[in-house]
Image (cartoon, rainbow, N blue to C red):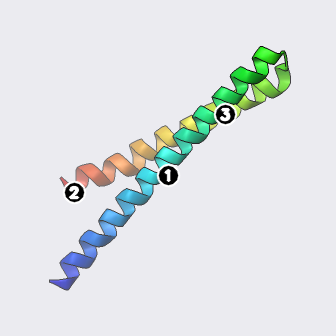
Amino acid sequence: MYDVLSELGAELLAVVAYAIGTVALSGLAAAAEYTSFQQLQLGNTIPGVWSAVIGLVALGFAVKLAREKLLVRITANL
């Protein structure tokens, strides 16, 4: 009985960790894109483009984490 509970607890912990990671990366991407927009509005082209690239990379990692880790764990347990 304790084996089943510990296995379910480990799976739940993994799902929660991947979900938090996905949300954190998405938040970072949104913040970077907002910063990029602000910089480009002020006429600072290089920092604006750099922030946009960082935001796109963070968003790409968030999508990759969600697709390859989070959704796999969720659908495997259903």
Compare marks 2 and 1 and give the one earlier in the sequence: 1
Q: Which residue is mark 1?
A: 21
Reply above or below: 3 against 33. Answer: below
Q: Residue at x 21, y 76 (%)?
A: 5
Q: Amino acid at mark 3?
A: Ala
Dot 2 alpha-carbon crowd within 10 angstroms: few under 14, some 14 to 19, many 20 or more: few
Marks 2 and 3, how far apart at CA: 34 Å
> Which is nearer the eye, 72 or 16?
16
- Position in image of residue 39 (x %, y %): 78, 23
Of circles 2 and 3, the one toward us is 3
Identified at 29% across, 71% down, the residue is 9
| Left or right: where 23 falls relative to 30 | left
Residue 21 position within the rendered picture, expressed as x and y whole percent measured from the top left: 49, 52
Say if 12 sits above or below 39 in the image.
below
Q: Nearer the viewer, mark 2 or mark 1?
A: 1
Q: Quadrant of residue 40?
A: top right
Quadrant of residue 61 within the rendered picture: top right
Q: At 48% across and 45% down in the image, what residue appears?
A: 23
**Of the residues shown, which amino acid type is indicated by label 2?**
Asn
Q: Could you classify mark 1 by the number of other residues whose Cα lies within 10 Å: few (under 14), some (14-19), or many (20 or more)?
A: some
Q: Position of residue 53 (x, y in %)?
A: 70, 30
Picture quarter containing residue 17? bottom left
- Indicate the quadrant containing the N terminus: top left, top right, bottom left or bottom right: bottom left
